[in-house]
Image (cartoon, rainbow, N blue to C red):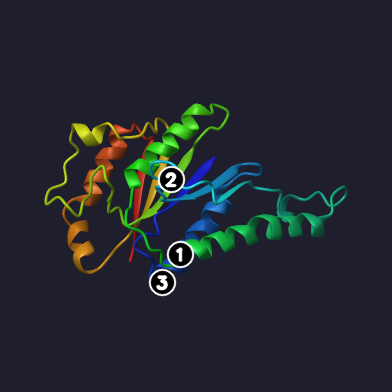
Amino acid sequence: MTVILFDKTGGFLTRQSRMITKVIESKVSDLTEGERLTIFKLDDREYKGLSLPLFDKCLPQSEETVNELIENKHMIAKTFNESFMADLYSITESLTEKGDANSSPIMESLADISSLYGINKKLRLKNIILISDLLQHSDDFSFYNNSSIKLDSQKLSLVPDFFGVDVEIYWLLREGREKTIQNTGVLEWWENVFITSEANEFKVRKIR
């Protein structure tokens, strides 16, 4: 299964929103029939940093795989477009709107994901897609309050277990003060986190 985690605390520029929509479409095309896609956002009101699932569905059959001798192509296409893609577009649109938040508990939300899927062994987590500016800000620790970013023992206790999971980050680049903080080694810090988490693969794409 694939999990997409949205960090909407800093909002999205119009061009970033368009690009994120294309990213989601691309990820859907990578899914196999019956594979599960779940979308969360950062939210410290439910767990330590994670919302309840905003979207949680298995990919239905698409019209490309229809056997027209025994299946109704029109009905299958309607199910795919209305019950899956329409809901997905609606969620994506709401998540790319600017959000007001006092915290950005990225590390805590990743730890929540690790715990949730570690408990349920029937759900095999294959991919995590994080859409974020990577600017951690929570009661545990904040990049806004520290001139130097270090992965010390306190933060190590929060590192999730992503053994064998592929992690892909779409890094939302900011301006002003946030840009200055992003240039202080933030990406290298997160790369160290995911190496420590034993993720199978770690990729980053910058979203300007």
Q: Report, in whole angstroms, how far the alpha carbon at label 3 lies from the one at label 2.
A: 26 Å
Quadrant housing residue 79: bottom right
Q: Secondary structure at mark 3?
A: helix
Q: Secondary structure at mark 2?
A: loop
Q: Amino acid at mark 1?
A: Thr
Circle 3: is it few (<14), some (14-19), or many (20+) Cα within 10 Å? few
The residue at the point 32 percent across, 53 percent down is: 103
Q: Which mark is residue 50?
A: 2
Q: Amino acid at mark 2?
A: Leu
Label 3 vs 2, first from the N-terminus: 3
Q: Nearer the viewer, residue 28 or 181?
A: 181
Compared across the picture, whether 171 is left or right of 63 comes to: left
Q: Which residue is mark 1?
A: 96
Label 1 vs 2, first from the N-terminus: 2
Q: Nearer the viewer, residue 16 or 147?
A: 147
Compared across the picture, whether 88 is left or right of 107 comes to: right
Q: Is residue 155 above or below residue 12?
A: above
Q: Is residue 177 above or below residue 129?
A: below
Which quadrant, please, contains the N terminus?
A: top right
Q: Which residue is mark 3?
A: 15
Determine contact: label 3, label 1, CB under 8 Å: no
Q: Is residue 169 above or below residue 192?
A: below
